[in-house]
Image: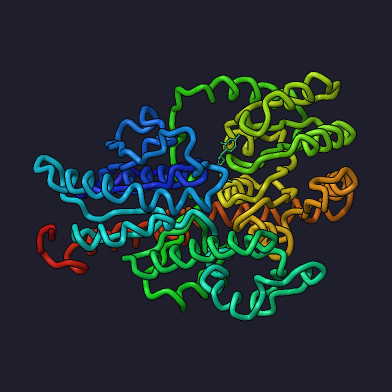
């Protein structure tokens, strides 16, 4: 990305400490840095980012109370993690931000950029008189649905049960009731989810702007709806990762990278199935078996990320029993994998980052959404953009027949060829939106940089920090 003249302003980023939230926030930091801003990152102790990959940023660690191994708020339970962090980070975050702002040697702080799930920052921003922009790391399609979730609850949609889960949500075609987040959860989890969503939407509504990792050519209808509903400027500046130079990580990932990329190098173009369900979703032991068996029976080479937290031993056992052409890793350099010519399909859980990454590399998808907004993403991938095939969990999780059918549809049937063609068109759109001077995301980044420079005077005048 082209380097702009320094602006003499700092932006302070505060990511939620989960991979799918940290990665896009750091990418956004790179984009803002390339546009002339200095970047400060305040981060939690828990899951702290690899600062060595971003030497041009300044990092400040705050305590979050998550050092206690017994704490119930784990990464796989965001319904308890997010409320916990909103309470535990308030004091340390505010103290840290005061220090950053008061540092006489530093450039003035132009604004905060916080994850949409950190609603407590609203009060901090007011007290410290620092404008606050929100980054939502999901797509516009799911955010639009979230703005209407209380209304949909009022209409009884959240209480619908089998066999009506297949019914359409008439207000949001082509979504089905079963695509609603937490639809199959307990009433108390539904309430917690609703609370999270309400806080997130309100955080965005009361901000000085909303940033989304998406592009107009992909999500214009949802973006238009959001612009009608939210009284703040919305900047669709994705795909983020295409605008950033890869960070040179020194972590253990480098080991897998060498191994799985050289394995990919040995394969024919578009022959490999890449399987990854992101950084949170867990796979049951019985599903491991089904996945392994079907992939082997498909006769296709496959690269499978079996995360250690899912079940290292199962993965190791299954891997030792496989006689086919596969590479099983604990973590893969996904951006490099997806852009590798030998990858022909991406079996994904439809996390938003994976969705954007798959689309911008033009890799057709097999969609197995697991939770949160992933069902919405999957519906858009399969039924709106039509660049993937749906592979739902059955009553007993992933079932052999369904997996085999999905692989066949993508690799052997005419439908697969059509999906591939549509995906190539979408990849082209993702590339055009970044084009200097004319692309929608390129121009939106320019608009965002100007917006940030104007914020401090417009939002709070010239007053200092209030007590
Ligand atoms: N990722 C990766 N290697 C892996 C698995 C995931 O680099 O083996 C990255 C992926 O590229 C994406 C992020 O982790 O940027 C996962 O985010 P996503 O929103 O797709 O899913 P989440 O982990 O939040 O469920």
Q: Position of residue 344 (x, y in %)?
A: 74, 40
Front one among 120 and 185: 185
Q: Is residue 272 visible?
A: yes
Up/down of 252 relative to 79, above or below: above
Report whether residue 6 is seen.
Answer: no
Labels in figure, total: 0
The one nearer the camera, 185 or 361, is: 185
Q: Identify the colour scheme used.
A: rainbow
Position of the C terminus, as image quadrant, is bottom left
In the rendering, at what x and y percent does residue 307 appear?
63, 32
Q: Quadrant of ligand 1?
A: top right
Q: Tell me what residue is drawn at x 31 percent, y 44 percent.
A: 33
Q: 11 left or right of 335?
A: left
Q: Looking at the figure, which quarter contains the N terminus?
A: top left
Q: Position of residue 205 (x, y in %)?
A: 39, 70
Could you tell me residue 115's position as x and y percent? 41, 53
Q: Is 5 located above or below residue 273 in the figure?
A: below
Q: Residue at x 28, y 42 (%)?
A: 40
Residue 321 falls in image quadrant: top right
The residue depicted at 86 percent of the width and 21 percent of the height is 323
Q: Is residue 68 above or below residue 24?
A: above
Residue occupying the point 70% across, 22% down:
263
In this rendering, position of residue 193 left or right of residue 467: right
> In the figure, is residue 30 to the left or right of 99?
right
């Amino acid at each position: 990305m082209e380097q702009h003249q320094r602006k003499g302003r700092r932006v302070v980023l505060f990511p939620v400490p989960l991979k799918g939230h940290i990665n896009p926030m750091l990418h956004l930091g790179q984009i803002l840095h390339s546009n002339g801003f200095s970047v400060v990152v305040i981060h939690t102790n828990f899951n702290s980012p690899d600062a060595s990959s971003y030497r041009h940023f300044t990092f400040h660690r705050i305590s979050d109370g998550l050092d206690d191994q017994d704490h119930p708020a784990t990464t796989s339970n965001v319904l308890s993690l997010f409320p916990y962090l909103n309470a535990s980070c308030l004091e340390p975050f505010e103290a840290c931000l005061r220090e950053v702002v008061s540092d006489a040697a530093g450039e003035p702080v132009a604004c905060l950029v916080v994850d949409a799930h950190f609603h407590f920052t609203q009060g901090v921003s007011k007290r410290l008189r620092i404008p606050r922009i929100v980054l939502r790391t999901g797509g516009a399609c799911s955010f639009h649905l979230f703005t209407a979730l209380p209304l949909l609850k009022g209409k009884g949609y959240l209480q619908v049960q089998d066999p009506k889960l297949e019914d359409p949500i008439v207000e949001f075609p082509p979504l089905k009731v079963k695509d609603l987040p937490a639809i199959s959860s307990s009433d108390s989890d539904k309430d917690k989810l609703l609370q999270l969503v309400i806080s997130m939407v309100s955080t965005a509504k009361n901000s000085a702007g909303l940033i989304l990792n998406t592009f107009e050519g992909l999500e214009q209808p949802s973006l238009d709806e959001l612009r009608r509903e939210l009284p703040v400027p919305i900047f669709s500046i994705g795909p983020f990762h295409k605008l950033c130079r890869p960070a040179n990580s020194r972590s253990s990932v480098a080991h897998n990278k060498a191994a799985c990329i050289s394995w990919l190098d040995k394969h024919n173009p578009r022959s490999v199935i890449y399987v990854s369900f992101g950084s949170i979703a867990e796979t049951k032991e019985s599903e491991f078996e089904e996945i392994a068996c079907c992939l082997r029976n498909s006769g296709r080479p496959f690269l499978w990320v079996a995360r250690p937290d899912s079940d290292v031993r199962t993965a190791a056992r299954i891997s030792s029993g496989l006689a086919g052409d596969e590479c099983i890793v604990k973590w893969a350099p996904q951006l490099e994998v997806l852009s590798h010519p030998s990858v022909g399909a991406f079996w994904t859980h439809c996390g938003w980052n994976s969705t954007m990454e798959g689309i911008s590399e033009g890799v057709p998808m097999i969609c197995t959404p697991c939770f949160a907004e992933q069902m919405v993403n999957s519906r858009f991938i399969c039924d709106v953009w039509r660049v993937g095939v749906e592979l739902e969990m059955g009553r007993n999780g992933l079932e052999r027949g369904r997996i085999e059918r999905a692989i066949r549809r993508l690799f052997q049937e005419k439908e697969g060829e059509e999906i591939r063609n549509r995906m190539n068109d979408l990849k082209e759109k993702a590339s055009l939106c970044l084009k200097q001077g004319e692309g929608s995301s390129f121009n939106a980044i320019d608009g965002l940089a100007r917006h940030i420079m104007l914020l401090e005077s417009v939002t709070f005048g010239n007053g200092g920090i209030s007590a």
